[in-house]
Image (spheres, rainbow, N blue to C red):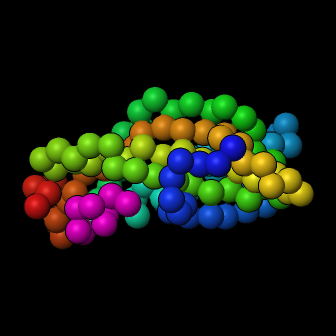
Amino acid sequence: MTPEFRDPVIRTAPQPSDCNSNGDIFGGWVLSQMDIAGGIMAARQVKGRAVTVAVEAMTFHQPIKVGDIVSIYGEIERVGRTSVAVKLTTIVARKLDSEEIKVTEGTYVFVAIDDEGRPRVIE
């Protein structure tokens, strides 16, 4: 599967320490990687600090395995007065296979904040 996106926001490889008791990569690890990618996109969009306030409609399609190359792609879904929603899709390439598989997708919502941590209007 070829992603319909251009370049990944981040690309990484999970380690054995990131596994759950079933031997797959722990879902929380995936969520945190997606949060990092979404935070990068949100900060660029709001031209400053942004914090995660919600995760909407998260779907796990396939497990991630140790040795997979994990790529997280994002697109700005909507921009409000103080918030921005980022649609994130996680694609993996299995260890020795070039086929790409969509494993998770969801929308993260971030709020732009000022230096005191209060919401601020996005300019």
- Identified at 89% across, 57% down, the residue is 96
- Identified at 38% across, 60% down, the residue is 41
Looking at the rendered image, the quarter that the C terminus falls into is: bottom left
Marks counted in the figure total 0
Looking at the rendered image, the quarter that the N terminus falls into is: top right
Question: Is residue 119 rendered to the left or right of residue 95?
Answer: left
Image location of residue 21, percent across then percent down: 83, 39
Let me know if residue 103 appears in the view. yes
- Identified at 75% across, 38% down, the residue is 63
Question: Is residue 71 rendered to the left or right of residue 82?
Answer: right
Let me know if residue 17 appears in the view. no
Q: Which of the two residues, 36 or 123, is positioned nearer the viewer here?
A: 123
Question: Is residue 99 rendered to the left or right of residue 10?
Answer: right
- Identified at 45% across, 52% down, the residue is 74
Q: Which of the two residues, 99 or 24, is positioned nearer the viewer here?
A: 99
Q: Which of the two residues, 111 or 77, is positioned nearer the viewer here?
A: 77
Image location of residue 45, percent across then percent down: 27, 61
Image location of residue 57, percent across then percent down: 46, 29
Image location of residue 94, percent across then percent down: 81, 51
Magenta span contains residue 26:
no
- Determine the image quadrant of residue 107: top left
In the picture shown, does residue 65 fall above or below 118?
A: above
Magenta segment boundaries in residue numbering: 41-48
Magenta span contains residue 47:
yes
Q: Which SS does the magenta portion mostly show?
A: helix
